[in-house]
């Protein structure tokens, strides 16, 4: 009889959850902090954030191997999990089942949001030097459109929820929180952590509208 460790699906789920924490989750935290610098104005943001990143050695390699590839695997295998989802909300009406369903749905929403966000910023900056040189003004123009600001707010909240809820679920799956009390305490921490990240992200969005 094969053990769970010999099961490829078991191993892929572990890699999927681990990449969701490091580096994808870590990058989310960094990116929200990075965008929160918008509150200090265009000059500070462009010189201290955008120029600093452009001056990093091996930035394209970092973007590909540390961010893009782990994110693609996490998103791709997340879609596989979603396709196999059997949450049965009407039959099993307990909170953990609802959170599992929301985790899968939020992941799909985040994927569409990321395609939009990366397309309008990083990819557009490849053929439009003005975007790369003055990202603050570009973001200000985008977010000045109410519908697009709404999309960014929803995308931000979905991303924060997905990360915070995934962190709580990961602790259970990896055997870090084994008792009900430990799960509730760490779940409460994840809620507070998610609210802090959401506030940081919304503060950053508002900074572009000054």
Image (cartoon, rainbow, N blue to C red):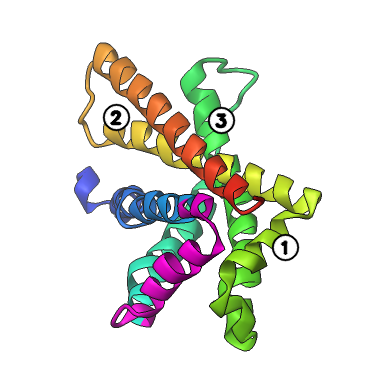
| Range covered by the magenta-colored residues | 37-60
Question: The N terminus lies in which quarter of the figure?
Answer: top left
Report if residue 2 is visible in the image. Answer: no
Tag 2 and tag 1, C-beta contact below 8 Å: no
Which residue is identified by label 2?
172
Q: Is residue 119 above or below residue 10?
A: below
Q: Main secondary structure of the magenta part?
A: helix
Sequence-first disc among 2 and 3:
3
Q: CA distance from mark 2 to mark 3?
A: 18 Å
Mark 3, Cα crowd under 10 Å, few <14 / some 14-19 / many 20+, is: some
Which residue is identified by label 1?
141
Q: Position of residue 90 (x, y in %)?
A: 65, 19
Residue at screen point 57% across, 45% down: 156
Is residue 133 one of those drawn in magenta?
no
Tag 3 and tag 1, C-beta contact below 8 Å: no
Q: Is residue 73 left or right of residue 107?
A: left
Q: Which mark is residue 127?
A: none
Q: Position of residue 104 (x, y in %)?
A: 54, 41
Q: Is residue 183 above or below residue 21?
A: above
Residue at screen point 58% across, 60% down: 114
């Amino acid at each position: 009889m094969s053990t769970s460790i010999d099961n490829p699906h078991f191993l892929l789920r572990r890699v999927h959850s681990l990449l969701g924490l490091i580096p994808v989750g870590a990058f989310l935290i960094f990116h929200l902090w990075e965008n929160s610098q918008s509150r200090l104005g265009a000059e500070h943001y462009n010189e201290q954030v955008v120029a600093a990143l452009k001056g990093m050695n091996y930035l394209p390699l970092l973007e590909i191997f540390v961010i893009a590839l782990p994110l693609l695997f996490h998103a791709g295998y997340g879609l596989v999990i979603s396709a196999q989802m059997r949450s049965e909300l009407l039959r099993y009406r307990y909170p953990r089942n609802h959170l599992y369903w929301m985790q899968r749905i939020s992941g799909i929403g985040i994927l569409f949001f990321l395609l939009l966000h990366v397309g309008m910023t990083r990819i557009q900056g490849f053929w439009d030097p003005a975007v790369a040189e003055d990202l603050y003004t570009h973001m200000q123009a985008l977010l000045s459109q109410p519908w697009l600001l709404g999309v960014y707010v929803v995308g931000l909240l979905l991303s924060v929820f997905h990360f915070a809820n995934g962190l709580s679920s990961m602790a259970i799956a990896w055997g870090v929180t084994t008792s009900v009390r430990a799960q509730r305490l760490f779940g409460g921490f994840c809620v507070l952590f998610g609210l802090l990240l959401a506030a940081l992200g919304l503060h950053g969005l508002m900074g572009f509208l000054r």
